[in-house]
Amino acid sequence: MKASFVSSSAISEAMRYSLMKTQVALAKAQKEQSTGFYADKGLALGARSSQSVSFNRELERIKGIVDSNAIAAMRLSATQLTLGNISDAAQSFLSVLTTGLSGNVQSSVITDSAKDMLSTLLSLNTSVAGEYLFAGINTDVRPINDFQDPASDNRAAFDAAYQQYLTEPGVDPANPFPTVSDMDKFISQYVEPQFTAAEVGGSWQNWSKASDQLIVSRIALNETVETSVSANNEGMRKLAMAAVVIGEFLSMDLNRDVRQSLVDRAISLVGQAIGDVDKLRSQTGIAEKRVSDASERLSLQSTLLEKNILATEGVEPYEAAARVSDYLSHIETSYAITARIQQLSLLKFLS
Amino acid sequence: MSLSTALNIAKSSLQNTGVQTSVVSRNVMEQNNSDYARRTAVLSSSAPGARVVVIQRATNDQLFRQNLSAVSSWSGQTTLYTGLDRLELYVNGVDNAQSPATAMTQLQKALQTYSASPSNRILADAAVDAARQVVRSLNDGTAALQTFRVETDQEIGTAVGELNTLLQQFKDANNEIVSGTRSNRDVNDALDRRDAILKKISEYIPISTFTRADSDMVIMTGDGTTLFETVPRSITFEASPAYAAGVPGNKIYIDGVPVSMSTGGNVSSGGKLASMLQLRDSVALTMQSQLDEIARGLINAFAETDPDPTGTLPKLAGLFTWPGAAMPEGLPSSLVSGLAGQISLNTAVVDHPEYLRDGGFNGEDYRHNSDRGSSYADLLIAYGKKLDERMDFDPAAGIGNKASLSDFSANSIGWFQGLRQEASRAAEAKEALAVRTAEALSNQTGINVDMEMSMLLDLEHSYQASARLIKAVDDMLSALLAAVR
């Protein structure tokens, strides 16, 4: 009799216990089925949780970098566009100058073209989202002063330099440049310093408030690249200088040689400047390519990470669904059994 | 002579049936009381009739002991697991939402966005806000940990009080049993009570018992300290009203011997007390030192250096600062207990978020952006990289000594969840064992109503038969008397 004794409370207790366990499991499985992830990630992954945290962190950061790369890419393409305009303007300025060499063109055509050039240079003041593109890191300051505005610093400085030249002994204000060497002397002593950087004794700062330091962007977790171009570039300075000397002095009554040397000098400057600007364009293009490559790489990486996250934290949906229905039928069975056991009592048969 | 003997036997049979019925009825009444052990009225025959000799109580010492130890380890394991669950919510939040790791991810993201448009004041504020969240996560985590420790401390105090009360009750039950056994009284109810109290005591602390003469019981704790011997031994504990980081709490003394705390996720010893001690002094302290190390890493990663790489200016606390920044050491070089509660955002950054971009929390000499260009991003990018650089950590924090700060914060979660997973698995296993042993014990000592009912049928028959006997003897006697008349 003792060998196979079972107590009534053990029967109902065992049933209650297993029912409770199944219901807890059902609640979890339902959550897993609806979300597709473990109901309690920490409990399911244990020490591997750090991996899941790292994956999620990387994913967040990569998304952040892809977003910020879009800003850099926009800046670079706007830069590229402006540089293209400047390059085109320089080309047409050069062709006007070259035809001017043959002497068949009126001076006014050439000076107008120089003024056009100066206006085009003002496109260096382009801004994107409130940031001046060509200001280096100094993006909240308009980089280039307008030479054609009489009140601006560069105009004033230039006028002052010219006035000072006129007061030099032996200079006739009525005919300031009688010879080529006079012109050369004026340009090298008074004009060129206006277009050289302050560090080497020039006063380019009257022209430009831009910083030489370029904007650096982090375009991947371990890659940085310069994503802007400064208005202080050599090419811009040469273009400005060519445009200024032509615009200011070609309309004067100069003798043929002086005029010739002036145009020659401008042609050489513009030629060099076109080379410089094209170099900038190719550099910008390379940076654009690096940014888009990095973004592409990052989105590949984020797809991989998403897969990894799903593999670590995710639950196979079919398995989850199967578990839910398993538990449901389990619970139904235990209800049925409980009901049957309740029926099975000696008390029913004693009357 | 023989007729009157038959009458006597039948009468005594009626009496016995009455006693047996009362035992059956008591058994049926207590069928759902797990602390009640089944009674059996054992008959032994002796001339001139059968009589009830003794009411036996079903026992199984071995199963009972097994159940005690299973209950003890289950209770300890569950205490640890629920404690860890609470800590997870307190410190890391649901799905780690409040964890330093998550806050740092947001900070890194905000720094990246800010570095892409450094002239944007709104992004600067967003980065500062993300930094503030990091500080808040560390500060709140520390506060939560200390609150948790104080709460656990109070729970220990309550548990010790309850344990003392239980021992007092145990003394009463034990005394009743000893005196009852000596005077040969029925002590079964007292035995039930004593066993029930033992089960409760074993929830607090693992115990072993042995029984001396007259059913006098002695209780020892798992590690051999006497808990009860004729009189209860005193269990003393003083709860602390507040806790400082890194300071272990007061000990529990049983009979002057300190209770040792359990170790590991699958706790080494049973009982609530050891697990609560482990939560208070091991788990919470390790978590605290992890937070402290994260705080130290942050202060160092955002420390300001001389803009000139060959310069001699000392490294000073930058975006994140601490009370020690004003002192000569400047930066925390090794684990500082409670640093996570002391770390704060440099107040200058509220009015000058650009200090984050340019440097200069410690004066003009520390300004990296000498041109003051508003799109200077080098320093921001450098901060972002610093968080990924490997640095040294105190091995006392339990998660290695070399890692990047962001990995360290992730590992901290890994460490905790590893412990929690182990605790949960062990809790499941121990729960199953406790339930199984309780079931086995119940099968040995519990009541089956059907069995009792069938016994009742037997008793009914026996009663009817005895009554019938009495009637028969009565008939015979009246027949005899009629003949005499």
Image: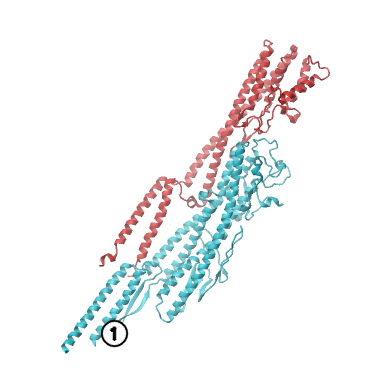
B87 versus A285 height, above or below: below
The amino acid beneath tag 1 is Pro
Where on the picture, by quarter, is residue B111?
A: top right
Q: Determine whether B210 is above or below B102 in the image.
A: below
What residue lies at 75% left-to-right and 14% top-to-bottom?
A: A258
Q: Which residue is mark 1?
A: B48
The reply, left or right, for residue A243 in relation to residue A67 is right
Task: Find the residue positioned furthest to the bottom.
Answer: B484
Q: Is residue A2 visible?
A: no
Where is the C terminus of chain A found, in terms of image quarters?
bottom left
Quadrant of the drawing holding the N terminus of chain A: bottom left
Q: Colour of chain B?
A: cyan
Q: Is residue B134 above or below residue B219?
A: above
Which chain did the renderer colour red?
A
Which chain is indicated by disc 1? Answer: B
| B298 displayed left or right of B306 | left
Outermost residue toward the right in this view: A169
